[in-house]
Amino acid sequence: MPLPPPSLFRVLFGSTAALVLLTSCTVPKASFRKVDETSPEFRAAVARETQQLQSADQPVADAAKVAAQRVKAQFVTAEKERRTAQVAPLVEVMAALEKPRGCWAYTATRTKTVDGVPTVTIETFDPFQSEERLWTLVSRNGQPPDAKAQADYREERLRKWKKSLNKKSRHSDAEFMARFARLADFEVTAPDDSAHTTYTFGRERTKVPLVGDTGAYRQTFVVDRTRQSLQQRTMELQSPASALAGSFKVDRLHSTADYTVIEPALPPFVTKTAVRYRAHVFGNDTGDIVEETVYSDYRRVKCYDDRFEVKIGVPQVSDLLPE
């Protein structure tokens, strides 16, 4: 069933900001491959490996150089395995978000503020209804729509929704997280007096020739350990980013999504999303934009297609009689 987007990655990468952010996931050197060859641990390992190569029945030429290469490869492999194990609980939680929930109706209250001027839109989504009535505009700035405005709203909303469904990512959020943990530096904090584990990922600013400036950014995931579910995720751009030779520039960007468990057997549901940003697109300033959406009144409903029972075979008399 369609729900509020559970993934901030897909929300962001489905926008023009993807041109800025995706480059930082493909161009910079993977963080786990960075080895401090001046550390005492590395030097001690190289010394041991060099001694073994020199004492072999057939001593290896340039033993120190070969040893350094071998030890570096060992350190890279060990770091990759360490990161994979450390982020495994988060990957499992992210994978759970992809599990089906069935059909749920809900209300979304969206407040979009542009340069201090707010617009409040309330809409409902109900998969029990037919396709053309999935979305209903309840009000905008407190005023209910007339028949034409309602029809236009439903048509536009349905078109955007179908377009979003057709956007398929090469990797799921869980797969992306597993890869990202090897690319970016991150830390895991799990205080003993808290039921939550926080995963914080950071990427430094990177300039890519003919592409742009990725800007430095940080992403945070808060996991409820007692329920093994995602509670919050954030993404913050910490320095301006640009793309397309500067024709697209993001000055500020901060996104947050909050989740809650409605039924223990189901993945968590989005309760609130917030995006704050300012950008320049082909010389046009978007102004300071803040968009917050609160999702409420979740209720399980029968899917529209499930309302009609289809039986294969020869009709029986009982099938033709009204209930």
Image (cartoon, rainbow, N blue to C red):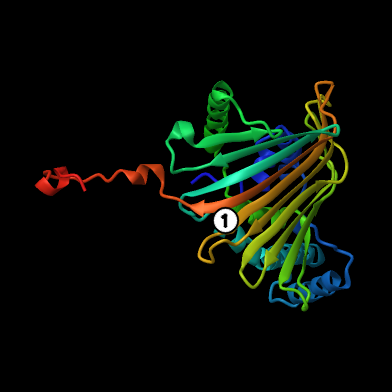
Residue 88 seen in render = no
- Using the rendered view, name the quadrant where residue 19 is placed: top right
Q: Nearer the viewer, residue 187 or 144?
A: 144
Q: Is residue 180 above or below residue 245?
A: below
- Write the residue at 71% across / 33% down: 141
Q: Is residue 247 left or right of residue 169?
A: right
**Disc 1 designates what residue?**
97
- Using the rendered view, name the quadrant where residue 72 is placed: bottom right
- Amino acid residing under circle 1: Leu
- Write the residue at 75% across / 78% down: 55
**Mark 1: few/some/many CA within 10 Å (<14, 14-19, 20+):** many
Q: Position of residue 89 (x, y in %)?
A: 64, 66
Q: Is residue 17 above or below residue 88?
A: above
Q: Is residue 190 left or right of residue 140?
A: right
- The local secondary structure at tag 1 comes to loop
- Write the residue at 56% across / 52% down: 298
Q: Is residue 45 left or right of residue 12?
A: right
- Using the rendered view, name the quadrant where residue 22 is placed: top right
